[in-house]
């Protein structure tokens, strides 16, 4: 099981995945250029997101709401081209 937690000014958001699978292929035609083809969440899975929402700043405000969601996401495929200016 994989989990991720994000902290914001007025909330804490946690995601729980049964499993996550990603892959990438990177190619450098010349030293200054990098090309990467990647896939995130290649196998679509269900996951749960919990949010603790506060009425104001987390450190001084009371907890106002707890949200629990079961979500499904699909694969994310992308291409990144990068040039180093050195």
Image (cartoon, rainbow, N blue to C red):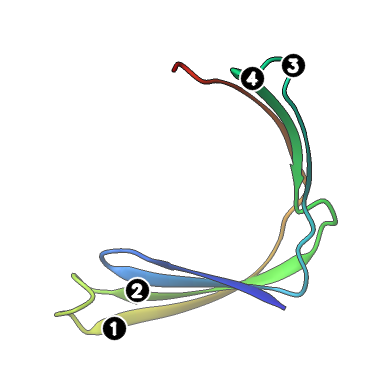
Quarter holding the N terminus is bottom right
Label located before the other in sequence (4 or 2): 4
Query: Which label is found at residue 53?
Result: 2
Which residue matches tag 3? 29
- The residue lying at 79 percent from left, 64 percent from top is 45
In this view of the protein, which residue sits in the foreground, 14 or 85? 85
User: Residues under labels 4 and 2: Cα distance?
Assistant: 46 Å
Residue count near mark 3 (Cα–Cα under 10 Å), binned few <14, some 14–19, many ≥20: few
State yes or no: discs 1 and 2 in contact (Cβ < 8 Å).
Answer: yes
- The residue lying at 29 percent from left, 83 percent from top is 63
Query: Which label is found at residue 63?
Result: 1
Query: Which label is found at residue 31?
Result: 4
Query: Which label is found at residue 40?
Result: none
User: Residues under labels 3 and 4: Cα distance?
Assistant: 7 Å
State yes or no: discs 4 and 2 in contact (Cβ < 8 Å).
Answer: no
Label located before the other in sequence (4 or 1): 4
Where residue 79 sits in the image (x, y, percent)? Answer: 70, 28
User: Residues under labels 3 and 2: Cα distance?
Assistant: 47 Å
């Amino acid at each position: 099981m994989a989990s991720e937690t994000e902290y914001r000014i007025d909330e804490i958001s946690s995601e729980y995945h049964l499993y996550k699978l990603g892959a990438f292929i990177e190619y450098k035609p010349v030293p200054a250029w990098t090309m990467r083809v990647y896939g995130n969440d290649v196998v679509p899975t269900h996951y749960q997101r919990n949010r603790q929402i506060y009425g104001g700043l987390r450190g001084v405000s009371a907890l106002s709401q707890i949200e629990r969601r079961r979500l499904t996401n699909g694969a994310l495929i992308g291409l990144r081209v990068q040039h180093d200016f050195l």
